[in-house]
Image (tube, grey):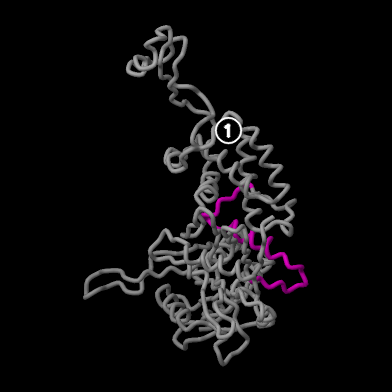
Amino acid sequence: MNKLIEVKEFDTLIGNEEYKDKYTCVDGETFADLLEFIHAFDSDSEESDVLDFIKIGYHRNIGETVTFKNYVGLIQMKNNCQIQVLPKIEFLNGEQDETKRVFMRMLRSMKDFPSKVFSNANLKMDRMNLYEIFINMYLQEVRQLVKHGIKSSYVGVEDNLNFYKGKLLVNEYIKCNVAHQERFYVGYDEYQVNRPENRLVKSTLLKIQNITSSAENSKSIRQLLTSFEMVSPSTNYDKDFSLVVIDRNTKDYEILMQWSRVFLKNKSFTTFSGTESARALMFPMEKVFEAYVAQNMKKAFAKYHWDVSAQDKGHYLFNKLNGENHRKFALRPDLVVTRDDKSVVILDTKWKSLINDKSKNYGISQADMYQMYAYSKKYGTSEIWLLYPVNEEMKNQESITFDSGDGATVSLYFVDVANIEKSMETLYEKLTKISYKREVDEHEV
């Protein structure tokens, strides 16, 4: 079975056992493999770097250290050692630590995350690491495909037959049948399941069969492979992926092809790629948190006829350059809420744990506040909100509001990701009270 090391985001790993009481410690060989993995990791984008989510440092006496930043997921190294990085989620109401379950709910809210039919109702997440859960998600998608029926198509076939069929291939006929003129070397189309999508699915099933250490997943793979007995495994992944065309007839393969690319090509859902013997599935928690809040806010606010727009476009910090009309520096707040009375509220999500210290501005970034002020002025609204994940230190903070004195206010709200529905209802109530107060003030004026 694969060796599993579990850490939380922002935890630090070391390879020096003398300091194992202060940090998460692994044996020297595993730590050396992790450093090699970091240095060997590739990026598909010039703007991305593995150090965006893993930081190599050095402490006197301890030696080199590895700190996992605000990316979470699973790293599998070539020695089969797995490092599972989970988000730091606070459970405030006495719930058990169900970080993986909450994290999976959050992941499914991401637009580009390939999941439709995944159900964790009967999944023993406490016994599965993230990679096994992802394998299980893939298997559920394959099961859905098999239920609908795997697709067939006409495939070009060349063969030397005892009877004439299709089109005679003269050159091949002459080469092969000098002594067997009773045969016909022909090309014809045959309706069969051996098409690129099915070859890639079968190859993925065979690969994860060798990777999985879960008895439940192994059993499912064996069962599903029986439906692909007439399909040959892919011998050229790149070629078969290039032949895949997703249309209304192949819609059932859309998500499966995304997963197959992850498993077969060791791709991640970020811009990073693994090597042939190492892989990583890492997710930026800033994006996950933003998508999770947006999805649940839209659901909660829709029944009150409030519109929620994610990543709103159209406003720019500057509209002219050298006196000419040139819009520069686009403003894209995470969320723009338009109430039923057409008033606007701007909300930005920040995956960061604040501190209960007014003298340090609660740990809020000065750059974030500049950004919020720009939103207020350009959108013509005084109602700006910063949404942070709730933590133990800030859970009893009722109201924190910064007022610029010239019509811009920035209020803080702490989202309980473990109880997101209730948290969004509470946020709606706060926004309603502010809307009512504004109407009263305007009426009195």
Q: Position of residue 66 (x, y in %)?
A: 56, 73
Which residue is located at x 55 percent, y 83 percent? 59
| Magenta span of residues | 88-117
Which residue is located at x 66 percent, y 81 percent? 19
In the figure, 300 relative to 211: above or below?
Answer: below
Q: Position of residue 160 (x, y in %)?
A: 44, 16
Which residue is located at x 59 percent, y 62 percent? 73
Q: Nearer the viewer, residue 273 or 148?
A: 273
In the figure, 400 relative to 305: above or below?
Answer: below
Q: Nearer the viewer, residue 33 or 117?
A: 33
Q: Is residue 107 magenta?
A: yes
Q: Main secondary structure of the magenta part?
A: loop
Q: Quadrant of residue 406?
A: bottom left
Q: Note whether residue 201 is visible.
A: yes
Q: Nearer the viewer, residue 401 or 269?
A: 269
In the figure, 390 relative to 186: above or below?
Answer: below
Residue bearing the label numbered 1: 150
In the rendered structure, which amino acid carries the disc numbered 1? Ile
Q: Note whether residue 302 is visible.
A: no
Which residue is located at x 68 percent, y 67 percent? 418
Q: Position of residue 281 (x, y in %)?
A: 55, 58
